[in-house]
Amino acid sequence: MAAGVLEGSVSNILEQESLKWVFVGGKGGVGKTTCSSIISILLAQVRQSVLVISTDPAHNLSDAFQQRFTKIPTLVNGFSNLYAMEVDPKVEGDELSGEGLDGFLSELTNAIPGVDEAMSFAEMLKLVQTMDYSVIVFDTAPTGHTLRLLQFPSTLEKGLEKVMSLKNRFGGLLTQATRLFGLGDEFNEDVMLGRLEGMKDLIEHVNKQFKDPDLTTFVCVCIPEFLSLYETERLVQELAKFEIDAHNIIINQVIFDEEAVDSKLLKARIKMQQKYIDQFYMLYDDFNITKLPLLPHEVCGVEALKNFSQHFISPYKPSHVRGTVEELQQRISTLRSQLEEAKLELERLQKGKQIA
């Protein structure tokens, strides 16, 4: 498909009424949170109820909306159908470190990398599944964490194997030890296996949904630089491997030539950016590519997010014509006042000479 055929907007996501999960991801510092916040605002205009979840430990969602969010879905100020929550896998994982069964599971998480994240993610999905949101937007952590999230079923599989091997090797001993330490009947292999199996079943069920392009899509956010292009390519390849649909790329922080005035530095930056933008269009000619302008300020607060959201719907057009005319008028006005001052000064000088 030719690059010019697809519109440079996220309208296709808003029009896809069957979508249940929208992931927004990319390299750190490219504006994922702003993009996921705006996508959730736009979805709230066309869908019954929207939940935006931050799985990034940095949790910029509260900063973007300028409102405090927790691990409980909270209604976003100014909306009746947009909710936000922030989930920290590390905190959730620490909560497992109680006594008895939870204490054992906590030990297990140390033995298998990623099990704590898998289990906290499973708990979160369980919570989300019980709620009736028509679409859920994930503001994901930087690329590596996002890809781990998609590997959770196999991570939990390893967890189950570990428990089984412990059961086979130390079954009787474990039972005696639990009685000895007064941990009670809840600390038995069947309960542990049941809990892990339940989580695994849930994650596998959700993963099936993630692999259905009617239900799930992934929006890649990047900036027009080499490392971001490289990271986006890696992300797109990995998503294809996991069979996750992706057909939207947002290129953020673009400097438009018409707005750069006469700065040599900006002109050089534009040239560099254009090289990578051309490569994005060449590599992803079957993607909807949305270009967003570099702004002189951060996009914070609901009103600022709403204002900026127009560039997600229709391609950004630099206001260079209006800007140039305004600049010209300003310069003419300045020159006129300078001319008036010069005339007055000349008149004063001539009067002074006549008196002398």
Image (cartoon, helix red, strand yellow):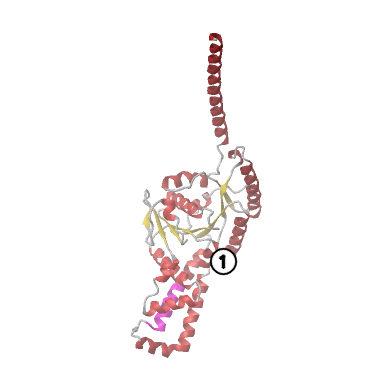
At horizontal 54% and vertical 30% (from top left) the residue drawn is 326
Q: Which of 178 and 331 is in front in this view?
A: 331
Q: Where's residue 229, x and y in %?
A: 61, 56
Total count of labels = 1
Q: Where's residue 238, x and y in %?
A: 59, 64
Counting other residues with Cα less than 10 Å from the Cα at mark 1, is it few (<14), some (14-19), or many (20 or more)?
some
Q: Where's residue 285, x and y in %?
A: 63, 52
Q: Nearer the viewer, residue 42 or 63?
A: 63
Looking at the image, is 256 positioned above or below residue 70?
A: above
Is residue 199 on the magenta stretch?
yes
Is residue 3 rendered to the left or right of residue 76? Answer: right
Q: Which element carries disc 1, helix, strand or loop? A: loop
Is residue 284 on the magenta stretch?
no
Q: Is residue 211 visible?
A: no
At horizontal 58% and vertical 61% (from top left) the residue drawn is 235
Q: What stretch is highlighted in magenta?
A: 187-200
Looking at the image, is 83 positioned above or below residue 269?
A: below
Looking at the image, is 322 positioned above or below residue 347?
A: below
Q: Name the residue under label 1.
A: 242
Q: Nearer the viewer, residue 275 or 218?
A: 275
Q: Is residue 276 visible?
A: yes
Q: Where's residue 115, x and y in %?
A: 48, 73
Q: Which residue lies furthest to the front in this view?
A: 356
Identify the amino acid type marked 1: Phe
Q: Quadrant of residue 187?
A: bottom left
Q: Is the magenta stretch mostly helix, strand or loop?
A: helix
Q: In which quarter of the image is the C terminus?
A: top right
